Amino acid sequence: MASSEHTYSDRTCRPEETLARVAPALAEHGVTRLAKVTGLDCIGIPVWNVMRPNARSLSVHQGKGITDIDAKASAVMEALERACAERSSLFVRTASAEELVGEGRLCDTLDDLVAIGHQPLDSGCRLEWVEGQDLIGGRSIWVPLEAVRLDFTRSSHFWQSSDGLASGNTDREAIFHGLLERIERDADTLWSLERFERQAATCVSSADLGDPVVTALVDRIERAGFMLRLFDMTSDLGVPTFSVLLAPAEALSRRSLRYIDMTMGSGTHPIAYRAALRAITEAVQSRLTLITGTRDDVEDDVYESEASEFLLRKLRLKPQGRIPADLTLPGDGVEAMLARLLEVLRDHGIGRVIAVRMNPGEERFSVMKMIVSGLEHPEGRRQRRFGARALSRLLVFR
């Protein structure tokens, strides 16, 4: 299988270099064990686990990749980014929104992230704030600490989620990947609101991507006795986004199928084949999530329920759609791709893209929390399920 260097990586250095540099930080952040779990499944696409027993959110983290070293680095960096979000060393300011505005500071109360059972903050309410940067407006902006922190051991006025949380060798690298995740979640939410007939029209063939690594992964999956369906979820933003449905090859001939027999993955990237690779490897990783049974967020009923007829209908579909166009050139670096993403968001009326550095002062790696309130969020325990983009889509259906 082809190497993940150059054409298949946005990282500023090789994964071996990243792992060597962050290795001393693992014990500092509570990591006790790294495990290669690839062999627990018959597919063979690399997946690693990293354990943090005293975590304040998830204690098991996963990483996937084209090569084994990619998957290992991916798992390690996911563990570090969550650890930094749980126990951040951010400078905190206690004030009200009214006080901050009175001082000439920009702030955002992030009403779209208020948790179920809570109300949007009054401008006179005093709380803890942290400073971020608005990449669209080019200004410093203050946001509530509870909206960026990830600590399930304490109650929060805001929905706590890893959505938009990403790590990298540099700040810009982490920002790029965090922003891709926010765009992916937005596209996924909008696509899920489409009628089945519209979703069916987005089923595409992986062969049309014309990429040798995608072809090799699909061949490996099929040789292992599985089938996959690839869907183009790309939204009006035009950033290639795919969803993958993975199931045993004989799934449609079975009398019954368990929910865990079918796994899904999604991925976003300015280059279409890179987005598809992310979705395919995530679907394989999802299988190993269920096989290992170690994730804190997988409920017992997941193993007991049957697959829905809706998923089975998707599995019966045949490719009929077209592959989305690349947003940038294959040779573009992180800076060029990030600039293009910000341009697209600005052109579509997204007023703020906020980046909060979650581990200030750390030179070995960067962790960023990306907040883009103008984009849709994944399902979660928020007071507001949908934002303006989803609501406008729902109104069209009425």
Image (spheres, helix red, strand yellow):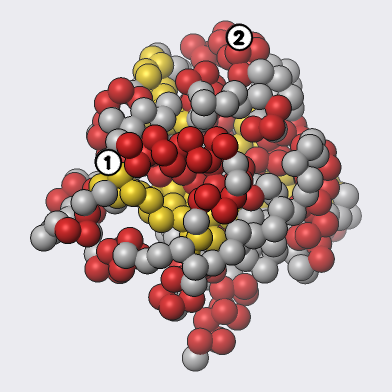
Tell which of 27 and 39 is nearer to you: 39
Residue 177 position by quadrant: top right
Residue at 71% across / 53% down in the picture?
Answer: 326
Which secondary structure, mark 2?
helix
Q: Position of residue 218 (x, y in %)?
A: 44, 41
Q: Is label 2 or label 1 in front?
A: 1
Q: Which mark is residue 225?
A: 1
80 left or right, relative to 264: right
Tell which of 10 and 24 is nearer to you: 10
Which secondary structure, mark 1?
loop
Residue at 50% across / 56% down in the picture?
Answer: 205
Which kind of residue does numbered mark 1 sit on? Gly
Query: Label 2, on which residue?
Result: 20
Tell which of 51 and 140 is nearer to you: 51
Which kind of residue does numbered mark 2 sit on? Ala
Residue at 30% across / 44% down in the picture?
Answer: 226
Residue 289 position by quadrant: top left
48 left or right, relative to 106: left
